[in-house]
Image (spheres, rainbow, N blue to C red):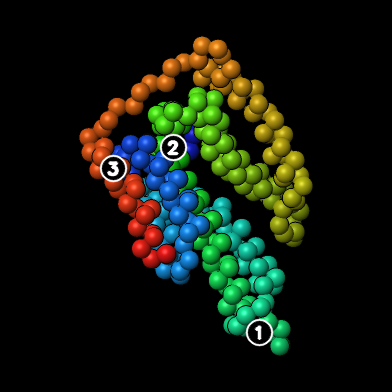
Amino acid sequence: MNVSSYIYGTSFYHKFDVRPKLISTLLFSVIAFIMSSWTGFALLFLMPLVIMVLSVGAKETWRCYSRLIPIFILLILFIPLQKRSGLPILSVGGFVVMTEEGLWIIMRIIARLGGISGALMLLLLTERNEDIIKGLRAFRMPYNAALTVSIILRFIPYLGSLFTEIRDSMSLRLEEGKHGYPILPSITALAVAAIKMIPDTASSLEERGFGRRNQRKSIKLPYPEGYLTQWLIGVIIPFSLLLVR
């Protein structure tokens, strides 16, 4: 609520109205589960990544995607061991490490996770929190529901960033010669930090009228120049993936 991941910019995606962005993100997330070809999954992963680089720069893009790398590593390590049926493509001493089917499953999951996460991160990096709420309200979503969605979109990435900072801090306190970081203390510290945020979050909710009988009326969003063009682009980009699905 009071923590925003918005990055100021003047890119073409920053100039897009929030309503086409929301629909484009939703369509992109739905179409991600329809893709079934190598080309389609490659585009699914790369499309939001390229747009993010053009919108907020390579450094910020790397900062966002680097949080997904541990998940990708776990998928690469464990899924091939669980799925060894099919045509072997990597064997060690007669033991099948990876099959063609196992590799396909990994690429499919990574593409979907990376693509959908990238689309959501792109929305958060190029739109302010209040504008996302206004956009949801423009689609007749109840105020409380719109506020809840906004909290989820902001709070989860913030906790991920906070956990990274706690983990790095814990690693610096380890004795010389030891590697890694203590998982349980890091999770405990994250839980304590999240609990301490409750008063601030409650104050932000009150300020925005959450729980009041007479809630603030949402401001109607204006129609910017090129609004219909933005809608067309926002719909065409995700639907273009269906051409190679």
Whichever of callouts 3 and 2 sits on the residue coming sooner in the sequence is: 2
In space, the residues marked 1 and 3 are separated at their CA atoms by 50 Å
Amino acid at pointer 3: Gln
Give the SS element for disc 3.
helix
Which one is closest to the eye, mark 3 or mark 2? 3
In space, the residues marked 2 and 1 are separated at their CA atoms by 46 Å
Q: Badge 1, how many Cα within 10 Å: few under 14, some, many 20+?
A: few
Q: Which residue is mark 2?
A: 6
Does the rendering let one see residue 53? no
Q: Which residue is mark 3?
A: 230
C-beta proximity under 8 Å, tags 3 and 2: no
* Residue furthest to the left: 225
Please tell me which residue is depicted at 68% across the width and 34% down the height of the picture. 193
Which one is closest to the eye, mark 2 or mark 1? 1
Question: Which part of the image, by quadrant, shows the N terminus?
Answer: top right
C-beta proximity under 8 Å, tags 2 and 1: no
Percent across and percent down for residue 169 are 66, 45
Percent across and percent down for residue 239 are 37, 54
Q: Which residue is mark 1?
A: 91
Does the rendering let one see residue 31? yes
Whichever of callouts 2 and 1 sits on the residue coming sooner in the sequence is: 2
Amino acid at pointer 1: Ser
